[in-house]
Amino acid sequence: MLVNVTIPVYNEEKILGSSIATLHAFLTKHCRFEWEIVIADNASTDRTLGVAHQLVREYPGVRVVHLDQKGRGRALKKVWTESPADILSYMDVDLSSNLYAFPPLIEALISGGFDIGIGSRLLKASTTRRSLKREAISRAYNLLVKGFFTTKFSDAQCGFKALTRKAAQDLLPKVEDTGWFFDTELLVIGEKLGYRIFDLPVSWIEDLDTRVKIVRTAIDDIKGLIRVRRSFSKGKYQKQN
C-alpha cells in the first residue's frame, strides 16, 4: 500500500525545508504504510524549486514535480494522475493541520470503509486558531456550498485531503477547476456520485503568510458553484463503474 503525500508550493523558499523535514520525520515514525512525498512547484519565481531539489537529495522518498503554470488544482491533478500510489493525498506546506490526524485519515481509506477523507476545521471536536474574519468567511462559504448542493461534508476548503486511486480515476477527469475551487468541485461531485466521505476533525492553526487572495478567491468560488450546479442540472456527471 503506497500513499502519496503531495505538497503544492508557490514561492515557499523560506518554510519548505523545515516543513519537509518535519513531515518526513513524522511519516517515518508514525505511519505503517509506505509513502512518497511529492513537492509540486507551481511556477515559483523565487528559490523554491532549487530548495526542493536539494530536499530530494537529502531525504529518501521525496521527489519534485515542476509546473510552468500556477494553480493548486492543476498541480494536484498532474501529480495524482501520474503517481503510482494507492492512496492520493495532499496537505498545505505550512502544515497548518496537526499531523497526528493524518494516519487515521489514511487508515479510513485503507480499510475500505471510505473513498475520500477530509480534515475539517468546522466539526465540534475541531480546534482552530485563526482570525475572526477568516472564521466567518469559511463558515459562510461552507453554508453556501450546502445551500447549493445539500451536501453533508463539513469543510470544503481545509488543505488536508485524501482519496483512493479508484475514486481519483473517476473524479479527476470531471473536475475542471485548476485553482482553489478544485477541492470543492471534487467533493461536491464525489458526494453526489455516491463516494463515501470520511469527515475528520483536526487541530488547525492559521498561516499568517498565506498566498490566498480572499476576495478574488471568493468570486471564483461562487462562479464555480454556479458552473457545477448547471452541470448537474444538465446531467453531465455519471459515476464510472
Image: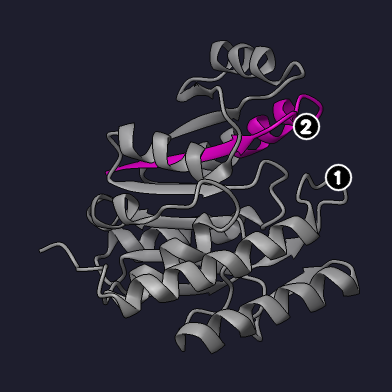
Instruction: Please tell me whether residue 45 belongs to the stretch shown in magenta.
Output: no
CA–CA distance between discs 2 and 1?
A: 10 Å
Q: Find residue 132 and report its horizontal and vertical position in percent.
A: 89, 74
Q: Find residue 204 and report its horizontal and vertical position in percent.
A: 73, 63
> In the figure, 210 relative to 233: above or below?
above
Q: Residues within 10 Å of mark 1 (few under 14, many from 20)?
A: few
Front residue of this view, candidates 200 and 29 = 200
Instruction: Give the SS element for disc 1.
Output: loop
Q: Which mark is residue 15?
A: 2
Q: Find residue 206 and report its horizontal and vertical position in percent.
A: 81, 58
Q: Which residue is mark 1?
A: 209
Give the amino acid at mark 2. Answer: Ile
Front residue of this view, candidates 144 and 152 = 144
Q: Find residue 209 and report its horizontal and vertical position in percent.
A: 86, 45
Locate residue 120 relative to residue 105 in the image: left or right.
right
Which quadrant of the rendered structure holds the C terminus? bottom left
Q: Residue at x 32, y 56 (%)?
A: 174
Q: Nearer the viewer, mark 2 or mark 1?
A: 1
